[in-house]
Image (cartoon, rainbow, N blue to C red):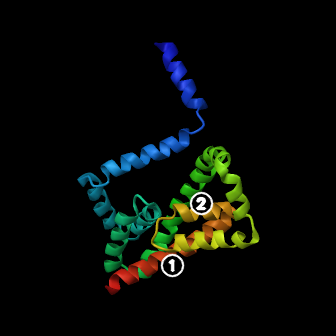
Amino acid sequence: MEEKILHVTSKWTNWNYKNTALLVLSLVIFFIFADHPFAKNIISTVGNFGYIGAFIGGILFVSIFTVAPAAVLLFFLADTLNPLLVAIFAGAGAVIGDYLIFRFLRDRVFDELKPLFLSNGGNLLVKLFKTPYFAWFLPLFGAFIIASPFPDEVGIGLLGASKLKNWQFLLLTFLLNTIGIFIVIIAAHSF
């Protein structure tokens, strides 16, 4: 029995796609529990923390899996608090969320998937994206996605491909998320 456990542990340790598998597993778990009353109760409780709640909402605003409840939370907070300050605090939180996604994707998932991508015709796409026409387009498109209310994962991936330094990434995502969140809050209040 002990040999089997060691064999399974060794297989897991040496498996090339363990971070990707954990990412997929976390997404499945999220979808299962997203509509659970407990999750909804947590979101409404966070709203009672004022600007700290906006900061937490900003962290949640960047992911495809938490953008909807985070947007509701930020909209609710902007009803009672200064919308610009809500956007600034949420933008600061979004930087943390984006950076965590950026580090996880760049340091683990991208490294795991790169050999698979390159072995299935990825070299042609890599060459295409390194042409002068796409060199400026990828970061611009990534910045647009981060500033929009769309979840940031794709934009972060595109910015990560553009070889930004960490401080540039942090500053850019703060500005883009703050502006994007402020526009979303103002637009939601207009309707």
Residue 163 in sight here = no
Image quadrant where one finds the C terminus: bottom left
Q: Quadrant of residue 133?
A: bottom right
Q: Residues within 10 Å of mark 2 (few under 14, many from 20)?
A: some
State the mark number for residue 102: none
Tell whether 185 sits left or right of 45: right
Residue 162 location in percent, x, y? 69, 64
Q: Nearer the viewer, residue 116 or 41?
A: 116
Residue at 57% x, 51% y is 104
Residue 76 location in percent, x, y? 31, 73
Residue 162 in sight here = yes
Mark nearer the N terminus (1 vs 2): 2
State the mark number for residue 179: 1
Q: Residue furthest bottom?
A: 190
**Which amino acid lies under the numbered mark 2 shown in the image of this protein?**
Gly
From the image, tell me which residue sits under label 2.
157
Residue at 61% x, 63% y is 158
Tell whether 187 sits left or right of 9: left
Q: Secondary structure at mark 2?
A: helix
Q: Nearer the viewer, residue 82 or 57?
A: 57
Q: Quadrant of residue 53?
A: bottom left
